[in-house]
Amino acid sequence: MTLKLGVPSKGRLMEKTFDWFSDRGIVLRRTGSEREYAGAVDGLDGIELVLLSAGEIPRELVAGNIQLGVTGSDLVREKIADWDSKLRELEPMGFGHADLIIAVPKGWIDVDTLDDLDAAAAAFRRTHGFRLRIATKYHRLVREFLRDSGVADYQLVDSQGATEGTVKNLTAEAIADITSTGETLRANHLKMLDDGVIHRSQATLFRGRRTDWTDGMRQTFDALSHSLGLGD
Amino acid sequence: MAAKTDIRAQAARLQAYFTGAGATVVEADILQPAEVLLDLYGEDIRSRAYVTIDPLHGEMMLRPDFTVPVVRMHMDSGATPARYAYAGEVFRKQEHEGGRASEYLQVGYELFDGADAAASDAEVYALFAEVLSPLGLRAATGDIGILIAAVEGLATTDRRKAALKRHLWRPRRFRALLDRFGGRSAVPDTRRELLKQVAAKGADALLQDAGPEIGLRSRAEVAARIEALQADAAEPPISASEVEILDHILGLRETCPNALENLRDIAVDLPAIADAVQRMERRMVALSDQGIDVDALDFEASYGRTNMEYYDGFVFGFYAEDRPDLPAVASGGRYDALTRVLGQGRSIPAVGGVIRPELVLMLTEAAT
C-alpha cells in the first residue's frame, strides 16, 4: 500500500507546495498533459501524489482516501468538526498566509472592537427588527469565535464570493472573510476590528488517522518525516 | 445502550405519570420553522440543531426541544390554566467526538398558570422529584429572577442595566461588562480616542471624514451610539460595594434556608431584590407543602446561567452524582419572558421541565 499525498491541484498554492517539498529533497511533479491531474513523486518510494482542490483535501484526509495533505489551516478548521481529534497538524509551511477577520464599514466610527460590534448589533436589532447580518463562507469558524467572544444578536448570511461587496449591496451589515493585505477591504470602505482576527491561516501539511496503516506505510512515513525534518 | 423499544416504554410510563397529574397530552411537529428558534436563541443554535431546507417553507429545524412549539400552541389556543405532557425525539447536533446523543427521547410537563407562581413552581418540581426519587439523584435549584432583580437594582443607568441583563446568560461577557461599568477594567484605547476626537471636532465632522455611508446601519445610528458612549463616559462607575454585592449573589451556593437568610441580609443593602427574595420564600413554603425537604435542598444563585437562556425565574435540575459524565437526567424552570416573546404582546406565566427517559432507564438498571 502506498501513502497518498494530496496537494492543491493548481495555481500558486501548488507551485509553492512543490517548491517546499523540493527544498527538502522530494520532487513532486505533474505528469501527462498540462490539463491532466496526475502526478509523481521522485526521491522517495511508496508515495503517490494526488492532485485535488484545496477545499476537498480536509474531507479526503478524514475519509482516509489520502493519508497526507497540504491545505490551508483555515479550511481544515472550517470544514471538519472537532478537527484536532481527526487530523494531525504536521508542519506549517510558511506560505499561503491569510487572516480570517471581521470587518465593518469604515463609517462605523463607533465600532472598533467585538464589544462595540455586540452593542451595535443589539441596537441594530431594536431599530431594524432583525439580527445584524454578517456575510461569510466560514460559518463554523465565525460562529465559534463570536460565541466564545459573547457577541449576540447577529446572523450569518452565506457569501461564497465577492463578500466585501455585500455591505454596499445591502445584503449584510458586516463581513467575515479572508484577507492578506487588506486592500480589498479598503477599496470597499471596510475596516478590520482590532480584536477581530478569527484565525491566521497558512498552508499546512496534515496527516489523517493512522488506524488502517500497513507497516509499509509507516516505514514510508518515517522516511518522509526524516526527509522533511518533522519532529514526529 | 438500552433498546429503543424499552426507552419508549419508559417514556410512556413517565408520560402516563404526568397525565395522572392532570396533564393533557400534546404533540409537536418534528420540523419547526427555523426563524422562530434562531430569533430566540441566536445564531449559536445552528451549531446545536439540525437545519434543513424545505423547498416551500425555507429553513426548518429538527425540533431541539418541545418548549417552544408547546408555548406557541398554547398561545394560539389560549385557555389557562393548562397542563401539558409530551414525549418524543429531540435532535441536538454534536460537534465533538465521543460526545452525547444527537437524537434522544424527552418527556415533558409544562404548566401555564398565572394564579400562584410559587405553587406552580412547587407543583412542577415536586412532580419531577417524586418520579425520580427511586434514582437517588442530586437536585440543583436556582432562581434567575433574583439575578435579574439584582441587576435592575444597581444604582446605574438603564442602558447599563439593559446591557448586563442581555448578557446574563453569557457569564464571560457579563463579567467583562461589569468590570468596565465598575471601573475595574480600563476603557478600551479606541473608545477613549474616539471620545477625545468627538470632543475636539464634533461627531458630525468625524462622520463626514469617515468615508461614504454604506450599508443599512445609517449615519444617524452611529451618531446615536456615539451619544450613548458620551453619556456613559460621563456616568460614575457602579460602586465597588454594589459590584461586591452582585459578586456575592453570583457566588452564592448554600442550602435553601441558608441562601434565603443570606439573600435577606443582602436585600437590606439592595432592596430591589426584596420582592424576588420574597417569591423565593413563598416557593420554599410551597415546596414544603408538597413534601419536599427544603432544608436539605441546594440553592445555587448562578445555576441555569448557561444553556438555559429562556429561563427567567426558578430553575432546577437532577443529576446522577456518581455519573458526572452524564447530562442532567431532568431539568426545567420558569420561562414567563419566553411566552411574552412568542405571544407577541400577550404573556402567560409558565413553568415546566423535561426528563430523559433513556437515562432513567439506564440508572434504574444500574441500581438493580
Image: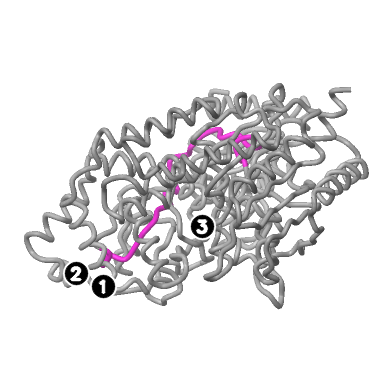
Q: Closer to us: mark 2 or mark 3?
A: 2
Badge number at residue B133: none
What residue is at 25 percent from the left and 35 percent from the top? B184
- Element class at badge 2: helix
**Label 1: few (<14), some (14–19) or many (≥20) C-alpha neighbours in 10 Å:** some
Residue B159 place in picture, x, y as percent: 30, 56
Disc 1 marks which residue? B219
What residue is at 47 percent from the left and 39 percent from the top? A93
Disc 3 marks which residue? A11
What residue is at 33 percent from the left and 58 percent from the top? A182
Per the rendered image, the range of residues in magenta is A82-108
What residue is at 77 percent from the left and 34 percent from the top? B132
**Label 2: few (<14), some (14–19) or many (≥20) C-alpha neighbours in 10 Å:** many
Amino acid found under the numbered disc labelled 2: Leu
Disc 2 marks which residue? B207
Q: CA distance from mark 1 to mark 2?
A: 7 Å
Q: Nearer the viewer, residue B45 or B252?
A: B252
Quick one: quadrant of the C terminus of chain A? top right
